[in-house]
Image: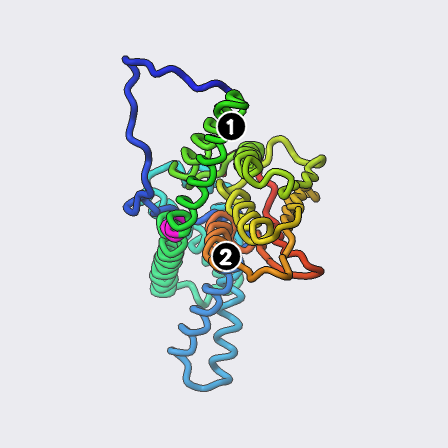
Amino acid sequence: MQACRESNPSEVIEPMASISQNAPVNSLPDFRNLGVMLRILVIVTGLTLLAEALKNNALVRWLEASAAAIAFVLPVTIISLLILGLATAWLRRIDYRAAIAFVVIIELAVVTATVQFVWVLLPEDNSLTVLVRYWLFTVLLALALIGYFNLRNRALSPALAEARLQALQARIRPHFLFNSLNAVLSLMRAEPRRAETALEDLSELFRVLMSDNRKLIPLEQELELCRQYLDIESLRLEDRLNVDWRIEELPDDAMVPPLILQPLLENAVYHGIEPSARPGTISIHIQRKSERLEMTLSNPVPETTRPQSGNKMALANIGERLQLHFDAEATFATRSEGGRFEVRIVLPYVKGVI
């Protein structure tokens, strides 16, 4: 642990980033994400069927027209996804409106090329009216999809999810802070160096909790925060708190959402260790399996003590942030079995920031 830095009078201290309810959330989705691809395919297919239903009242005619339309639309959608998937990183760096314009232009180009190919096979359908109709449908569909993902991004945006997380932290933090300070005070005379280290850990923990947590961070950084938190808790819980780290297969370059494990450890201590007078073990197992990162955290469930409330908000927040970052490619599950409560997270193995 680094020693506390001396303040520099010439150093300009910037105000700490807040929760930023007005933080920009306008960004295109990650077209490489499996969940995004599936959502687009389902929405495109559904809107195509609806459009054909509005034009054809008879069931047989609707089925025939829908089959022909889907046979045209799906290849266009797949080709578009391949192109946009390759351009995703670039699209997220440019202006949002310019990115939307690029997406619409790509869609129109793919549709035009596909229509030209179909006209080679079916010359009787080659009319400008048909092409304009395809252009209009393509633009409306592209804008509808962009609007849908924008609304979904806002609904799952960190500004809203972090607001719920901070509401939970505002209730737990004083209890944790007072206990931690009392533990540090008890060490001041007997073990001043250990007390200093605990205060540094506490300062770093609250710095991270109050910072802007919208980007992926190295997994090792998250684990270091977890170690600092557990070191603080061990000051007062002493031998009652045991931690089983199983991270031998930890990849060095893995990136994860911030505060994905520390709130779970806080729950594990609050619900599994504090209510019991006996020692308990929190188990943390992280490993890479192919292109997936698996995290399992478990804690004992006291049988003789009434369980404490307030667990669901942090769990719901973590689930929402996993959806925001990884959509359907991440899973989050909990279970209680054999006297232990377990949380299991599976997410894509990401090297570097998306």
| Residue 110: percent from left, percent from top | 45, 52
Secondary structure mostly taken by the magenta-highlighted segment of the chain: helix
Q: Name the foreground residue: 150 vs 113.
A: 150
Residue 34 spot, x, y in % from top left: 56, 53
**Which label belongs to residue 311?**
2
Residue 219: quarter of image: top right
Residue stretch rendered in magenta on the structure = 163-167
Q: Residues within 10 Å of mark 1 (few under 14, many from 20)?
A: some
Q: Name the residue beneath numbered marker 1.
A: 187
**Is residue 251 shown in magenta?**
no
User: Which residue is depicted at the point 62% across and 42% down?
Assistant: 241
Residue drawn 43% across and 30% down? 203
Amino acid type of the residue tagged 1 in the rendering: Leu
**Disc ID at residue 108:** none
Decide if residue 227 is on the left or right side of residue 94. right
Q: Looking at the image, tell me whether mark 2 or mark 1 is earlier in sequence order.
A: 1
Q: Is 165 part of what is drawn in magenta?
A: yes
Q: Tell me what residue is drawn at x 31 percent, y 43 percent.
A: 20
Residue 272 visible in the picture: yes
Q: CA distance from mark 2 to mark 1?
A: 31 Å
Inspect the image, locate mark 2, and give the three-letter code of the amino acid beneath it.
Asn
Front position in the image: 323 or 61: 323
